[in-house]
Image (tube, rainbow, N blue to C red):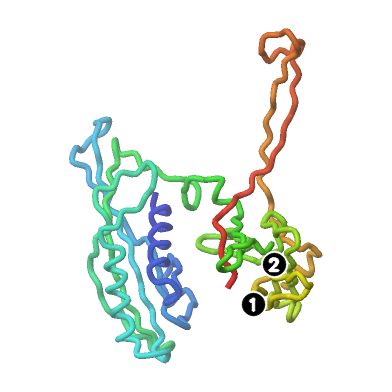
Amino acid sequence: MLLEIENQLHRRVHSTLGQSAVVLRLAEELDQSGRVAEQAMVIVSFTGADTTNPNKGAYIPTVRTRTLTYTLTLVQKQTQREGHSFCLPILDLLADSVTVWVPEIPGLEFQTGFELGPEKFVQMTKEAAQFIYEQTYTIEVLMHDGRFYSQLCAAFDLVKVSDFLPTRKCLVTPGEGRQTGLAVWRRQTGVDEFEKFVVEDIRCGRLIGDNLDVQCTNPGDGTATYVFIPITAVKPDGTIDQTKVITGTLSDVWKCTRRGIDSGSDIPPWFKLNVEFGLWRNKIDTVPNTQPDTSAYMPIEFEVNREYNEKPVT
């Protein structure tokens, strides 16, 4: 339970501050950790708990309240900017985001959200010239019959198949909305971390006669130029109507990245979800059933691929 709440508090702070600060967790004193802040740093940590029981005694059914205390320690290096004037707005931002917020953890009944307690300026270190501030938050959990539930994993979350499937957006031309044969493939690689590449995808098929040419500008860095000539740009005399030709530059093109070149494949080697099921085929003049002597089992496989809204080429 303590770890699940700390994990969610860590994610809450990280999503609130974005790239404005490094958010991490320490169980030891900052001075003993060996860490020096190169930019604003927020440390999320569990610091203590207190349990109250209105009915003392063994074997007495009761409900206990467990008050948990967490601290947010803000460290700002003085040499980067005016440390004091930079830290105070961040403290306000953290207070607005965390106060009364209730984590979503199955099996736990929260009596309160996070309540902000003491805030203080801790010190300005001499060696690293760092401003250090601290906020203290408490949250109350109701424990029926005194049992303390906790998940064994680092963080409990429902697993959904959709979280593991890559997404694909077909790139289309502005105006006519013609599919160019290019697509943006995107997948999640971690918590709030994604990677995406532009690939030539046959499922975003062009019309017969459309022509697409993608050339890497500097193989290895993922950049490329493209020329898309729709069939409607070809005049009866065979010349090309340049007003209908679409050209431009692309980034993160898979076949132009170092990984794409090393793989030797035009598309990322991302897995597909294979689902297998069976179909019972009944023999003639038999009642539908699953008996081996009157029916035959035919395995069927299909692949699930996710289709998403098309996105114009820009």
- Foreground pick, 101 / 213: 213
Residue 3 drawn above or below residue 212 = above
Q: Quadrant of residue 46?
A: bottom left
Which element carries disc 2, helix, strand or loop?
A: loop
Q: In terms of sequence position, does the residue under pointer 1 or pointer 2 come before the other? A: 2
Identify the mark at residue 243; answer none if there is no mark.
1
- Foreground pick, 40 / 253: 253
Query: Residue 158, how many percent across, how many down?
Result: 48, 45
Residue plotted at (49% across, 77% down): 34
Residue plotted at (72% across, 72% down): 257
Residue type, label 2 = Pro
Q: Residue furthest right?
A: 264
Query: Residue 4, how many percent across, how many down?
Result: 42, 52
Query: Residue 130, how many percent across, how many down?
Result: 39, 85
- Could you give the CA–CA distance between mark 1 and mark 2, rounded to whole angstroms? 11 Å
Q: Quadrant of residue 8?
A: bottom left
Image quarter hosting the C terminus: bottom right
- Foreground pick, 22 / 171: 171
Identify the mark at residue 16; answer none if there is no mark.
none
Which element carries disc 1, helix, strand or loop?
A: helix
Residue type, label 1 = Thr
In the image, is 299 to the left or to the right of 20?
Answer: right
In the picture of the structure, the residue carrying the numbered disc 2 is 230
The reply to whether residue 259 is in sight is: no
Q: How many marks?
A: 2
Residue 78 drawn above or below residue 23 = below
Q: Tell me if mark 1 has few (under 14), some (14-19) or many (20+) residues whose alpha carbon lies within 10 angstroms of its own.
A: few
The reply to whether callout 1 and callout 2 are in contact (CB within 8 Å) is no
In the image, is 53 to the left or to the right of 168?
Answer: left
Residue plotted at (74% across, 67% down): 211
Q: Tell me if mark 2 has few (under 14), some (14-19) or many (20+) residues whose alpha carbon lies within 10 angstroms of its own.
A: many
Query: Residue 19, how many percent across, how many down?
Result: 45, 75
